[in-house]
Image: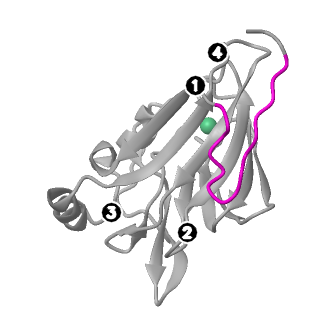
Amino acid sequence: MNKPYTFDLIKPDFIPSRYDNHIIRRLSSMKGQYLDQQAYQKMLSHTDRVLYEVYELKRPEIVGELLHGISIVHPGKVGQEFFMTKGHFHTLLETAEVYNCLKGQGVMVMETPEGDWAVEELYPSRVLYVPPCWAHRSVNTSRTDDLVTFFVYPGNSGHDYGTIEQQGFRKLVIEESGQPVVIDNPRWQPTGGR
Ligand SMILES: [Fe+2]
């Protein structure tokens, strides 16, 4: 399929009017990622909640293509830590990504292999440019609303989830006195993989 195409992102849910893949990530796929492991196990023993969903338009994963779709992070917390995506580097590290927030409120937590980090706010109309080499994770800091973002990244980027699964992000976003707060991740450890 190599003809121009269109689709619509319709309020209030912004689910694309056409898509090829619908990925559902549940609590059970985030083993070891949340700081409060006790709260994680307790929540998981109760029910395997859906934390986030991705709707993808399928394109060839090659240079020149742009992969795009919608990410929806649901509201909630594990202990004091907000629901979030797994987060990843791109396998081809030197590839960027653009996010446009359509709904909700949250942050993008980012870091580089060299130790730089950044946390940028996301809210409707906000556009975020994630430069090459920055790992990225969406965090929903709303108590009630989904965090919905539209994303675009190069077709040949690939996803490296393993590095983050092993070492975590340097920074975490938790709720303190009703406010989102960025803290150091006490469990962060370099694997030497990157
Ligand atoms: Fe990405």
- The residue identified by callout 2 is 145
Ligand 1 within 8 Å of disc 2? The answer is no
**The residue stretch that appears in magenta:** 4-18
- Which marked residue is nearer to the observer: mark 3 or mark 4? 4
Q: Main secondary structure of the magenta part?
A: loop
- Of labels 1 and 4, earlier in sequence is 1
Left or right of residue 31, residue 118 in this image: right
Task: Indicate the secondary structure of the residue bearing disc 2.
Answer: loop
Q: Name the residue under label 3.
A: 35
On the question of residue 24 being in view, the answer is: yes
Given residues 10 and 41, the one toward you in this image is 10
Say which amino acid is labelled 1: Asp
Residue 17 in which image quadrant: top right
Label 3 crowd (10 A; few <14 / some 14-19 / many >=20):
some
**Mark 4: which secondary structure?**
loop
Q: Distance between the residues labelled 4 and 2?
A: 32 Å
* 190 in magenta: no
First reached walking from the N terminus: tag 3 or tag 4: 3
Residue 139 placed where, x, y %?
54, 60
Q: Crowdedness of circle 2 by 10 Å Cα count: few (<14), some, many (20+)?
A: some
Look at 44% across and 61% down and name the residue there.
83
Disc nearer the start of the sequence (4/2):
4
Name the mark nearer the viewer: 1 or 3. Answer: 1
In-image side of 46 versus 17 (left or right): left
Question: Could you say which disc has been placed on residue 61 in the image?
Answer: 4
Badge 4: few (under 14), some or many (20 or more) residues near its Cα, within 10 Å? some
Mark 3 or mark 2, which is nearer to you?
Answer: 2
